[in-house]
Image (cartoon, rainbow, N blue to C red):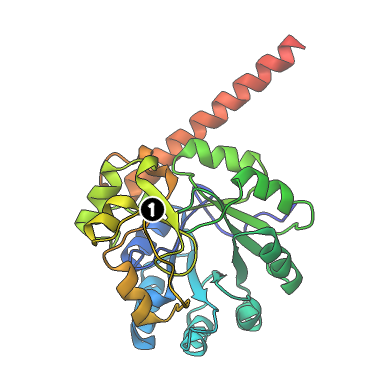
Amino acid sequence: MPPSLPFKMRLPVISAPMFLVSGPELVIAACKAGIGGAFPTPNCRTPADLDSWMGQITDALSPTDGPWVANLITHSTNSRLKDDLALVAEYKPPIVITALGSPKPVMETVKSYGGLVFADVVNMALARKAADAGVDGMACISAGAGGHTGHLSPFAFISALRQFFDGYIAVGGGIADGTGVAGAIAAGADLVYMGTRFLAASESRAQDAYKNMVVDCGPDDLIVSPAITGTNASWLIPSLIAAGLDPKALDTPVTRDYSGDAAHKRWKDIWAAGQGLQTIDSVMPTRQIVDRLEAEYWTAIDRFSARTRNMEMAS
């Protein structure tokens, strides 16, 4: 078993980094509500913007708040990685999550100030590479996740990973209520990576039309396709149609490019979401979302405990 997380958290949840959606407002609100708050550094168009965001976040938070998390793209097309990593060294986010590339480029910097490095992984091959690199944890992107998604069941992913990895596991994919959080923890995860549930948060930078679409849609309104970014991602079908695309006739891009301008253009009006849509019934502040998650979480734990007691009595 991994050691206990070195953070004070009300719930074992991280508001996942969402491209063009997670800004300092959502990160701060999540941390103040007692969970982790994450954002992808490409949401900042320049290193100067990232400097401003990190300063805003660190100025707003206290040691009693949840941990803030920086998500770094380590893919070769990210020409800004060196500049972003220099700001990580300055502001010292408690957790750094790497994505779309090896975690090795960030290890020395983050370890030097006592931070934790998590690798974003979508399959077992990447998970083994991350374990070999010496990461502290993994963000396991499973089937049902929004944005760039995986194909493994969250439960199967956790079970397979625990065969060789004793670090922290954050699992995401279709988990959007406190019952799902409790189930993931019972299955062996340490944290739940939850993005879609916070798309419609008041502090989210998603457009109002995007938030309303999240509220109005359900799992059947999603399609998984590599056509927009070159990597499988889960998209809201109504947003594809509104952008003039036929969901049944999508073409795959020739190249993958995760650099700022190209990525911003693709994601601006074509919107991602995960399979947890059905539980989102309104736009509300992050604290209210966490309040609801906490109530659902403890109800699930009480139900599990009651079932366990009944089974013991029956035996």
Q: At which x and y percent is residue 200?
A: 30, 51
Would you call the spot at circle 1 few (<14 residues within 10 Å), some (14-19), or many (20 or more)?
many
Residue 153 visible to an observer of this rendering = yes
Q: At which x and y percent is residue 235?
A: 38, 55
- Left or right of residue 264, residue 4 in this image: right
Specify the farthest residue to the top.
314
- Left or right of residue 259, residue 157 in this image: right
Between 70 and 213, the residue placed more toward the observer is 213
Between 154 and 183, the residue placed more toward the observer is 154
Circle 1 sits in a helix, a strand or a loop, which is it?
Answer: loop
Residue 147 image-quadrant placement: bottom left
Between 66 and 136, the residue placed more toward the observer is 136
Mark 1: amino acid:
Ala
Which residue appears at 72% of the width and 12% of the height?
313
Residue 27 image-quadrant placement: bottom left
Which residue appears at 26% of the width and 55% of the height?
241
Give the answer, above or below, for where 23 lies relative to 222.
below
Specify the farthest residue to the front.
249
Residue 65 visible to an observer of this rendering = no
Q: At which x and y percent is residue 130?
A: 69, 68
The residue under label 1 is 273
Give the answer, above or below, for where 311 lies relative to 292.
above
